[in-house]
């Protein structure tokens, strides 16, 4: 599992590594430049012209070294520099570049003709303030050109700790070194970074005791998503009860149920108003329904007892998808708060909690607010949530307990002890119903938590990752505009499923 790091922490870690091993910084720079050159190959044809923008510090040194490597591969390296007197190891690499016949120049007024790619090696994490002057002009020039930009470590102008950066470079790919910088995932980061490639520069992954936000890798997901055992039955994978749906919002309950079934829950039951049963049974026929009595369009008093009986022995539950915000649902939420199983709290369940004096949720429960719901749960305004997402995340967990996922282009998660992030996803998920799909995914994972060995935070991470992957598949097949939550639910996949799973092998022919 990867973790993030701040620029200041990375600087201390590099210094500690070099001091204790005697490995010089110029070697780390050479390995960094090699990774940048590999990225350039993904955006520029062999032998084509690439423009390298180099600053006076180590980030510029990476750029000088990458320009030399591109030249040695037969490409055309054009180098613009902010200073002809770089410092330290950057000066060494500028000299090596010049010995290869490349002469850096001051930035021109327009980008050179025929350039196929730009490398941003101006400042990286070395700049914590907005771009200005010549650097800002170059960022705007590159943005207007439409050329792919490869950012070295972090797009120049983006704050590596907070993600602030109004005029940062817009990269098609960011090659970051050793560990993901936190700012790539926060604030403006997701809009600036493009593809994030984490490059090995020789520092062991476990060097230094520096915690950061946890990030799942594909290898982690494959390890966590165990295949279904051949000798199993529906009870092996848990029964889930979903308190969901209301008049006009039955689709939310169906989306949640379909996602829950696709993620492997043994039995999915939708506890809903009795008037909704025909609709939900039609939309999600593989789920069963628990009709909750109604009286004059409201939950009848006996509905709470009916739900209490339903959740006895359940492996997991979820509440909120399309539930509506009528106060008559509050006694049902009280039933789930007292249930022995973990509960996913989402959507209208969170809005109802925010308007009540409810107590903290159980430690094993999951809360999944979007920024608007988070603002209501905390009594903050939306602008503050957007400006301080990590502070909002911690405040949500402190006030409401459980493990919390704050939704966004990059979703942030915490269980109070550790923090995690998920950047795996697509703009296709920016549509109504996507959250209902995520709730179903998480409920199914909670139902299988013991079999899979999942704690609350890891369940959130895995659920967000699998949901994001489904969003990417829907975007690839349909386009991010045409894809919808139903399509996302239909494209959920379990990485542990193999093509030959089963307990009956084909008989050999005589």
Image: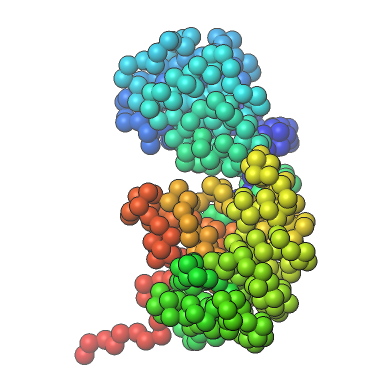
Is residue 441 left or right of 179 when viewed as pictured? left
Q: Quadrant of residue 224?
A: bottom right
Q: Residue furthest left?
A: 510
Q: Is residue 303 visible?
A: yes
Residue 326 percent across, percent down from the top left: 62, 68
Up/down of 508 relative to 110, above or below: below
Up/down of 278 relative to 99, above or below: below
> Residue sitting at 40 percent across and 57 percent down?
484
Residue 41 percent across, percent down from the top left: 38, 34
Is residue 46 left or right of 399 when viewed as pictured? left
26 or 327, nearer to the observer: 327
Q: How many marks?
A: 0
Is residue 313 left or right of 426 when viewed as pictured? right
Residue 369 percent across, percent down from the top left: 62, 57
> Residue sitting at 38 percent across and 23 percent down?
145
Q: Residue furthest front?
A: 296
455 or 238, nearer to the observer: 238
Q: Quadrant of residue 507?
A: bottom left
For the C terminus, the quadrant is bottom left
For the N terminus, the quadrant is bottom right
> Residue sitting at 73 percent across and 67 percent down?
361
Residue 478 percent across, percent down from the top left: 33, 53
């Amino acid at each position: 599992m990867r973790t993030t790091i701040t620029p200041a922490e990375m600087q201390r870690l590099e210094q500690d590594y070099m001091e204790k091993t005697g490995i010089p910084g110029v070697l780390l720079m050479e390995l960094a430049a090699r990774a940048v050159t590999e990225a350039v190959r993904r955006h520029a044809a062999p032998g084509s012209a690439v423009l390298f923008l180099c600053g006076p510090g180590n980030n510029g040194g990476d750029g000088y070294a990458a320009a030399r490597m591109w030249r040695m591969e037969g490409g055309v390296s054009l180098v613009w520099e902010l200073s002809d007197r770089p410092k330290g190891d950057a000066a060494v690499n500028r000299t090596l570049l010049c010995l290869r016949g490349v002469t850096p120049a001051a930035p021109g007024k327009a980008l050179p003709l025929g350039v196929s790619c730009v490398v941003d090696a101006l400042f990286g994490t070395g700049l914590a303030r907005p771009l200005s002057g010549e650097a800002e002009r170059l960022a705007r020039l590159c943005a207007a050109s439409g050329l792919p930009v490869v950012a070295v470590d972090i797009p120049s102008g983006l704050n590596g700790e907070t993600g602030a950066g109004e005029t940062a470079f817009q990269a098609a790919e960011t090659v970051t070194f050793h560990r993901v910088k936190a700012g790539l995932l926060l604030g403006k980061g997701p809009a600036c970074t493009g593809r994030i490639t984490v490059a090995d520069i020789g520092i062991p992954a476990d060097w230094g005791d520096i915690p950061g936000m946890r990030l799942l890798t594909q290898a982690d997901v494959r390890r966590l998503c165990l295949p279904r055992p051949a000798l199993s039955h529906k009870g092996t994978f848990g029964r889930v009860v979903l308190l969901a749906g209301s008049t006009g919002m039955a689709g939310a309950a169906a989306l949640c149920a379909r996602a829950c079934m696709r993620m492997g829950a043994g039995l999915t039951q939708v506890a809903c108003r009795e008037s909704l049963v025909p609709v939900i049974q039609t939309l999600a026929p593989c789920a069963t329904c628990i009709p909750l009595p109604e009286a004059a369009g409201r939950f009848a008093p006996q509905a709470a007892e009916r739900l209490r009986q339903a959740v006895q022995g359940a492996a997991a539950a979820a509440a909120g998808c399309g539930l509506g915000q009528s106060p008559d649902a509050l006694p049902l939420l009280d039933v789930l708060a007292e249930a022995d199983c973990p509960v996913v709290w989402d959507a209208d369940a969170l809005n109802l909690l925010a308007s009540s004096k409810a107590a903290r949720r159980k430690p094993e429960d999951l809360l999944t607010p979007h920024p608007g719901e988070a603002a209501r749960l905390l009594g903050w305004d939306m602008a503050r949530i957007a400006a301080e997402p990590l502070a909002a995340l911690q405040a949500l967990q402190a006030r409401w307990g459980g493990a919390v996922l704050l939704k966004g282009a990059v979703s942030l998660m915490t269980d109070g002890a550790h923090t995690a992030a998920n950047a795996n996803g697509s703009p296709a998920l920016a549509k109504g119903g996507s959250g209902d799909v995520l709730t179903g995914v998480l409920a199914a994972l909670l139902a299988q938590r013991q079999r899979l060995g999942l704690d609350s935070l890891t369940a959130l991470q895995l659920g967000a990752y699998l949901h994001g992957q489904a969003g990417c598949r829907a975007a690839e097949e349909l386009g991010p505009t045409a894809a919808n939550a139903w399509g996302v639910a239909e494209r959920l996949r379990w990485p542990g499923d193999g093509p030959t799973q089963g307990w009956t092998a084909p008989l050999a022919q005589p």
